Amino acid sequence: MKLKIVLREDKVDGGYNVSCLTLPGCHSQGETIEEAVENIKDAITGYLEVLDERAKKIKDGKVMEVSV
């Protein structure tokens, strides 16, 4: 799966802020570009795990998987 991210230099505190455009509220940061990218990968993984757990709790519908 490939997702678009936005990387911005933090001109106040230094380092970089990074967000995943596809997943609202999924943000991270790092001192270097490489660290910020690795951190957003971890944040994305955690975000998707939470969504998967929420889907398992749905009782009034059928949960299915699709590939895109």
Image (tube, rainbow, N blue to C red):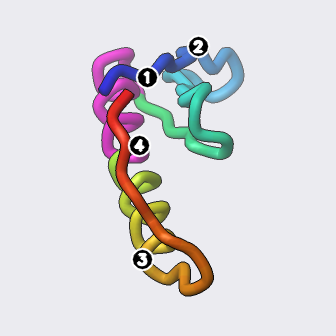
Which quadrant of the figure has residue 38? top left
Task: Name the outermost residue toward the right.
Answer: 12
- Give the left or right position of residue 36, taking residue 28 as reference: left
Give the CA separation, mark 3 to mark 2: 38 Å
Disc 1, disc 4: CB below 8 Å? yes
Residue stretch in magenta: 31-44
Q: Earlier in the sequence, mark 2 or mark 1?
A: 1
| Helix, strand or loop at mark 3 | helix
Q: Secondary structure at mark 2?
A: strand
Residue under numbered circle 1: 3
Q: Is residue 5 left or right of residue 41?
A: right
Residue type, numbered disc 1: Leu
Residue on which the image places disc 4 = 44
**Amino acid marked by disc 3:** Lys
The numbered disc on residue 15 is none
Q: Amino acid at mark 4?
A: Ile
Residue 52 versus residue 32: which sits nearer the camera? 52
| Mark 1 secondary-structure assignment | loop
User: Mark 3 = which residue?
Assistant: 56
Q: Residue at 33%, 48% (x, y): give it.
A: 45
> How many residues crowd mark 1 within 10 Å: few (<14), some (14–19), many (20+)?
few
Q: Nearer the viewer, mark 3 or mark 1?
A: 3
Q: Are marks 3 and 2 in contact (CB under 8 Å)?
A: no
Q: Position of residue 8 (x, y in %)?
A: 60, 14
In the drawing, does residue 16 fall left or right of residue 25?
left
Residue underneath mark 2: 9
Percent position (x, y) of residue 6?
57, 16
- In the rendered structure, which amino acid carries the disc numbered 2? Glu
Q: Nearer the viewer, mark 1 or mark 4?
A: 1
